[in-house]
Amino acid sequence: MAKPTAASVRLQREGARATLLIDRPEKKNALNEAAWLAFQSVAAEIGAESEIAVVTVRGAGGVFCAGADISEFIALTSASTERRDAFANAVRDGEEAVADISKPTVAAIEGACVGGGCQIALACDIRIAAEGARFGVTPAKLGIAYPVESTRRLVSTVGRSAAKDLLFTGRLISAGEALAIGLVDRVVPAERLEAELDALLAQIEANSRYSLMVAKRTIDALDDPESHADLDALWRGGFSGEDLKEGARAFLEKRRPDFTWRG
């Protein structure tokens, strides 16, 4: 099994903001097994940092992610079942590690966002794209299938018909079409991406970490009735929380709140 390397996916910190950077620019950030494994270790690092408020997910060199590293697929066709399962588990667990990050995650998308790149983008909470970005879900061009959870996220985001269109054709679509079908939430001029991203992160960062945590957990678990009692308890818990005291005082005093909850 490949081992994660610091060069494939790495964490950058700037105050309360973190960046999960796919860092294989020489491969247009195509995801190999080491990268999928590194998502798990970097996500665990983020989870251990209570001061992180929001996470940006992006690719190095002006490209989000060109998809899977196809060079690894050839060897898989003649590998043992155990070896193929290990690879599939790395892909699945890497995507789920990104989806399970408890902080709000924002995918900042430039250039290609294809295949595995769409998996990672869809595992994020919000997707903002630069004009000129291109999107595609292309397993049919390789003779493989999209993972089940990835397909569920795609359908949940764009709907059944649009998901089938993308999966059946494997075509690349523009940032404008991605916005029209709901695959991304915002499209901005390329030269404005950093400024728009900074403004979005600042809005999120200024809010209560408790509120952000509960909102993300609640939205992600809405289809799981068994979790609703726990979510209800989190909602009720906010009324006795330290952040409500500060938020209410700040509102009445017409000042910016200084929230302290870190979990």
Image (cartoon, grey):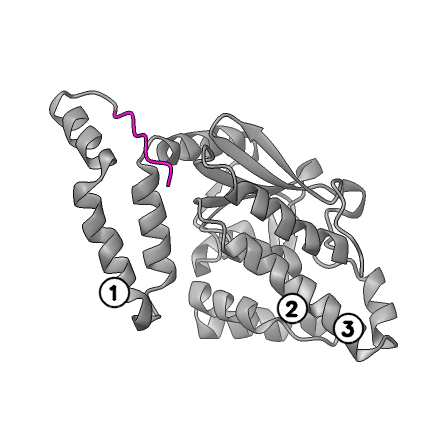
Residue interval drawn in magenta = 257-263
Decide whether residue 261 is among the magenta residues: yes
Mainly helix, strand or loop, the magenta region? loop
Q: Position of residue 126 (x, y in %)?
A: 45, 48
Q: Amino acid at mark 2?
A: Gly
Q: Amino acid at mark 3?
A: Arg
Q: In what quadrant of the picture does the N terminus appear? A: bottom right
Q: Position of residue 192 (x, y in %)?
A: 51, 31
Mark 3 lies on a secondary structure that is helix
Mark in the foreground, 2 or 3: 3
Which labelled disc corresponds to residue 229?
1
| Distance in Å between CA atoms under marks 2 and 3 | 24 Å
Q: Is residue 209 visible?
A: yes
Q: Amino acid at mark 1?
A: Ala
Contact between marks 1 and 2 (CB within 8 A): the answer is no
Q: Nearer the viewer, residue 8 or 240?
A: 240
Asked if residue 183 lies left or right of residue 79, the reply is left
Instruction: Indicate which disc, 1 or 2, sits on the residue closer to the N terminus.
Output: 2
Other residues around mark 2 within 10 Å, as few (<14) / some (14–19) / many (≥20): some
Asked if residue 182 lies left or right of residue 94, the reply is left
Which labelled disc corresponds to residue 170?
2
Mark in the foreground, 1 or 3: 1
Which residue, given by chain and number where applicable, does mark 3 sit on? 84
Q: Position of residue 106 (x, y in %)?
A: 49, 44
| Distance in Å between CA atoms under marks 1 and 3 | 39 Å
| Distance in Å between CA atoms under marks 1 and 2 | 41 Å
Which labelled disc corresponds to residue 14?
none
Instruction: Indicate which disc, 2 or 3, sits on the residue closer to the N terminus.
Output: 3
Which residue is painted at 43% across and 34% down in the image? 201
